[in-house]
Amino acid sequence: MFTGIIEAVGVIEKIEENGSNIDFTLTCPFTQELKIDQSLAHNGCCLTVVEIKGDQYVVTAINETLEKTNLGKWETGSVVNLERCMKMDGRLDGHIVQGHVDKTGEVAGIENKDGSYYVTIQYEDSGDFVTVPQGSITVNGISLTVAKSEDTRFSVAIIPYTWEFTNMKYLKVGDKVNLEFDIIGKYIARLINKQNVIK
């Protein structure tokens, strides 16, 4: 379980194919605090630490994860948003994030609003996912508030701090981002879809 509050960014140091899986080697500011078998969200995707060597650690992404997320587009030098799992005795500063990416979206627009940024993201409609104004959405692991909501796109307003200390500042129009929709919204959408089928 995560909150969508990014702790730090990591850098991809090495990418190695391992059958249909890929092993990613990263560096980050808190590598020395990690443990083998620990869960760590990478751009919102929960991966398990499988090896630690000096100031670097390794995680493995299976083929299903690579197909559903933007991890397959990572390159050596890519900057990744990182968050360790939440502590049950801590404050939930973001919102409930599972670390299970629902799908990728595409950056459709980026506007500089005199220091803050307005980012619009579009995604393919399957009927299972919705956004609502002032609702929660996770983009590349970041807990954000929906500023504008449409059927297959939404916009978020990014404060300068989030822009500077996450990988948001590297985004370009056309880039793929990982999306995890609000868990409560997903349950409601699924229930409504079931009722419509029964009718």
Image (cartoon, helix red, strand yellow):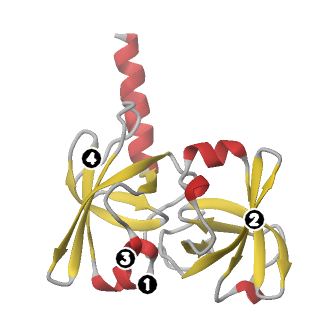
Q: CA distance from mark 4 to mark 1?
A: 25 Å
Check whether the beta carbons of the residues at disc 4 and disc 3 lie within 8 A of each other: no
* For residue 52, side relative to residue 123 (left or right): right
Q: Amino acid at mark 4?
A: Arg
**Cα distance between the residues tagged 3 and 2:** 24 Å
Disc 3 and disc 2 in contact, CB within 8 angstroms: no
Q: Residue at x 60, y 53 (%)?
A: 72
Foreground mark, 3 or 2, reads 3
Please state which of the two labelled residues, at mark 4 or mark 3, is closer to the viewer. Answer: 3
Q: CA distance from mark 2 to mark 4?
A: 31 Å
User: Residue at the location (70% across, 44% down)?
Assistant: 63
Secondary structure category for the residue under label 4: strand
The mark nearer the N terminus, 4 or 3, is 4
Tell me which amino acid carries mark 1: Phe
Residue 153, numbered circle: 4
Q: Quadrant where the C terminus lies?
A: top left
Labelled pair 2, 4 in contact (Cβ < 8 Å): no
User: Circle 2 sits on which residue?
Assistant: 59
Q: Amino acid at mark 2?
A: Val
- Residue occupied by mark 3: 169
Where is residue 173 drawn, in percent x and y? 31, 59
Q: Closer to us: mark 1 or mark 3?
A: 3
Residue type of the residue flagged with mark 3: Lys
From this viewpoint, is residue 87 visible?
A: yes
Q: Is residue 197 above or below residue 31?
A: above
